[in-house]
Image: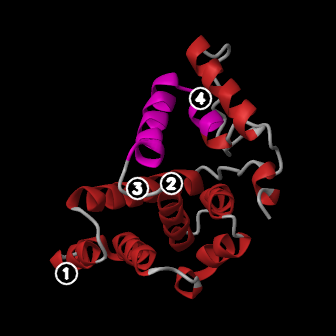
């Protein structure tokens, strides 16, 4: 999409003016990132939808978990690579580069996570996320047991499944609406 002022191909303008708490959230994004992510702008046509999206995202990606923030971002990238979601590959690829300090890791995960130098824990997470993305009805006890064998608790498995499920949903919405990644993501942490 060439018009970077419109985050998607849909004509759904942001609420204007934004409620004070939403404006504060967007101001924090601008302060921390230098911009407001287009996924937030895209949802800001309906503040209840934006709040639901951000609450789920923040809980899954930022709350306490047995998974590190990097591991959750790695899931986002691998799921997005399988789904070919341009927005999420760009945005979460930048997050992997930032959190890992390794630009090559971000690129490997985007292209084919199996070529990345992953430890057994990371490999188990990403293998599960990939299977859940491509064949969720085929996930069985052996797949969950492989995660347990890699040191994950059942709570961790819940988190892995939920992060994977969230990005499968958001990938589909982003792709269906031609959501454009913010240009700033492309040069971050390279």
Name the one closer to the observer, 131 or 158: 158
Q: Name the residue under label 3.
A: 163
Give left or right: position of 122 versus 97: left
Placement of 36 over or under 148, stated as above or below: above
Q: How crowded is mark 4: few (under 14 residues within 10 Å), some or many (20 or more)?
A: many
Q: Which residue is drawn at 49% across and 52% down?
A: 170
Measure the alpha-carbon separation of dots 4 and 1: 41 Å
Mark 2 against mark 1, which lies toward the viewer? 2
Mark 4 against mark 1, which lies toward the viewer? 1
Indicate which disc residue 104 carries.
none
Q: Residues within 10 Å of mark 2 (few under 14, many from 20)?
A: some
Q: Mark 4 or mark 1: which comes first in sequence?
A: 4
Magenta segment includes 62: yes
Numbered range of the magenta stretch: 40-64
* Secondary structure found at label 4: loop
Measure the alpha-carbon separation of dots 3 and 2: 11 Å
Give how far across and how far down residue 138 sits, in percent.
24, 78
Magenta segment includes 69: no
Mark 3–mark 1 CB contact (< 8 Å): no
Q: Mark 3 or mark 2: which comes first in sequence?
A: 2
* Secondary structure found at label 1: helix
In which quadrant will I find the C terminus? bottom right
Name the one closer to the observer, 21 or 14: 21
Q: Mark 4 points at which residue?
A: 44
Indicate which disc residue 69 carries.
2
Q: Name the residue under label 1.
A: 142
């Amino acid at each position: 999409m060439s018009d970077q002022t419109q985050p998607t191909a849909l004509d759904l303008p942001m609420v204007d003016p934004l409620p004070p708490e939403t404006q504060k959230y967007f101001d924090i994004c601008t302060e921390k990132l230098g911009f407001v992510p287009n996924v937030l702008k895209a949802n800001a046509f309906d503040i209840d939808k934006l709040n639901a999206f951000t609450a789920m995202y923040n809980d899954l990606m930022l709350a306490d978990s047995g998974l590190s923030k990097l591991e959750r971002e790695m899931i986002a990238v691998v799921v997005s690579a399988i789904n070919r979601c341009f927005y999420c590959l760009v945005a979460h690829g930048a997050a992997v580069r930032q959190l890992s300090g390794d630009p090559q890791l971000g690129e490997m995960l985007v292209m084919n996570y199996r070529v990345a130098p992953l430890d057994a824990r990371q490999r188990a997470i990403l293998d599960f996320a990939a299977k859940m993305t491509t064949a969720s009805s085929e996930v069985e006890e052996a797949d969950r047991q492989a995660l347990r064998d890699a040191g994950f608790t059942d709570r961790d498995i819940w988190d892995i499944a939920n992060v994977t499920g969230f990005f499968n949903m958001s990938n589909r919405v982003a792709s269906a609406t031609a959501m454009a990644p913010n240009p700033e993501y492309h040069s971050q942490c390279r």
